[in-house]
Image: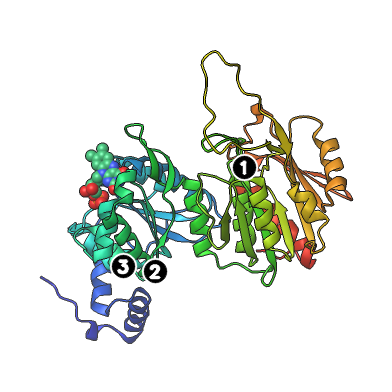
Amino acid sequence: MASITIRNLDEQTKQLLREQAARHGRSMEEEVRHMLRDATTPPSVSADDPPPQPAEAGGSLSGKRILLVITGGIAAYKSLDLIRRLRERGAAVRPVMTEAAKQFVSPLAVGALAADKVFEDLFSREDEQDVGHIRLARSCELVLVAPATADFIGKMALGIANDLASTIVLATNSKVLIAPAMNPAMWNHLAVQRNVETVKRDRVEVVGPMRGEMAESGEAGLGRMAEPLDIVAVVEALLDDGPKPLAGKTAIVTSGPTHEPIDPVRYIANRSSGKQGHAIAAALARLGADVTLVSGPVTIADPQGTKTIHVESARDMLNAVEGQLPADIAVMVAAVADWRAAGQSGEKIKKKPGEAPPPLMLTENPDILKTVGHHAKRPTLVVGFAAETQNLEDNARAKLQRKGADWIVANDVSPDTGIMGGDHNRVRIVTHSGIEDWPKMDKQSVAERLAREIVKSLTGSSKTG
Ligand SMILES: Cc1cc2nc3c(=O)[nH]c(=O)nc-3n(C[C@H](O)[C@H](O)[C@H](O)COP(=O)(O)O)c2cc1C
């Protein structure tokens, strides 16, 4: 068999080889072996390959490489949507699946959506030669584990590396984010809580879980995986290296509905999901603002990079907002109940046979936007939201004057628009100088555009990257 001695190559070839080997972090012998194998085997995946072309370039995650570890939970089906959302924003997603994950979602579907090979086996000769688990672990900006099972979190906490996914998590020097998903009893178990605390101490970021109904058995509680868009928002915040034109500015954002108690078990609420307000808080934080989010009861995750104060009623929300003044920016997105029950019952109101239903008397809630708009410590920029089902522009213009706001973001929340609780929004920006009509966009895009307008208004600059 012929052998090649590097020493015998001419100087120019040796120099080129030396440079190429250094670029790939290999010895010259290793580089030659790779070159020969590449030349003689059909094309396969290498960590040195450029990341697969994302669905859309120029998004908020453009150029970012994410290693997505899918573990064996029922929420694994959501990882398909997660891949799509990450790629939509420009990320290259390289999937890794545990053995158990393959019971829940097919590697074929995962690979097709990611437009990349699915890595599964620590002891695959082909994968190990092509990429190697250590380089796989390092050729990304983020390792995202979604869903993260109780089992996998336990392995992370103990430093166990007995399959490809767990080995990668130990070997990586990139950021690690996990999205736990499990039955509420499992999540609440002391062992799981202990493990979660341990991985947090090891600088692993955690998103969720959320409260809600489980996919199986109709059980409800804390344990649902965070929704893909919420995970994406955390990924964006973690990988953000964009300009910070709002550095040094403080912002208060309200979000979600309020719950106005009738008695200890019943309350008046509305359909606000908090998606728009949370997205605005996250977008302002990404631009460097010091953001406090005052959130009513929602089922979505607290946005990354903000301080979140959780409240229930309009009065609690007002107290929390006033407690954060002075601030430079106030964006009042919450759907605050106009009325609350007059005289909350201390006991559950009982249904009595033969008696007429009790009357529900209402009294007016404090007007948070108006209070902030006329406050002695009024923020420099006060933005309110107007959710209307009729006469959108007239109502928004009147609200602008009455509330002392600088801008009103008006949206039509008639049921057929799907805006209340949905993922999209179509807004009109009403200011003292006119009205701007924005096309239908997802709520994150509305948030980003609004944040850019806020930068322009406060700094006179449009450089937000
Ligand atoms: C139908 C079914 C659903 C499951 N769902 C979950 C889950 O949501 N979360 C979880 O932590 N474990 C769940 N498990 C248990 C895991 O699949 C099991 O712990 C497995 O060993 C996890 O392996 P992995 O962490 O290597 O992916 C489920 C098991 C079954 C059979």
* Image quadrant where one finds the N terminus: bottom left
Q: Foreground residue, 465 or 8?
A: 465
Image marks 1 and 3: residues in contact by CB distance under 8 Å: no
Q: Earlier in the sequence, mark 3 or mark 2?
A: 3
Give the Cα separation between the discs numbered 1 and 3. Answer: 46 Å
Provide the residue designation for mark 3: 135
Q: Is residue 198 above or below residue 302?
A: below
The amino acid type of the residue labelled 1 equals Pro
Q: Which quadrant of the figure has residue 69?
A: bottom left
Labelled disc at residue 203: 2
- Residue 165: % across, % down: 27, 57
Report whether the residue tagged 2 is closer than 8 Å to ligand 1.
no
Counting other residues with Cα less than 10 Å from the Cα at mark 2, is it few (<14), some (14-19), or many (20 or more)? few
Res 131 seen here: no
Provide the residue designation for mark 1: 257
Q: Which quadrant of the figure has residue 74?
A: top left
Q: Residue at x 76, y 52 (%)?
A: 383
Which secondary structure, mark 1? Answer: loop
Q: Earlier in the sequence, mark 1 or mark 3?
A: 3
Q: How many marks?
A: 3
Q: Residue at x 73, y 61 (%)?
A: 329
Which secondary structure, mark 3? Answer: helix
- Residue 295: % across, % down: 59, 51
Which secondary structure, mark 2? Answer: loop
- Residue 280: % across, % down: 64, 53
Report whether the residue tagged 1 is closer than 8 Å to ligand 1.
no
* Image quadrant where one finds the C terminus: bottom right
Labelled disc at residue 132: none
Image marks 3 and 2: residues in contact by CB distance under 8 Å: no
1 or 3: mark nearer the eye: 1
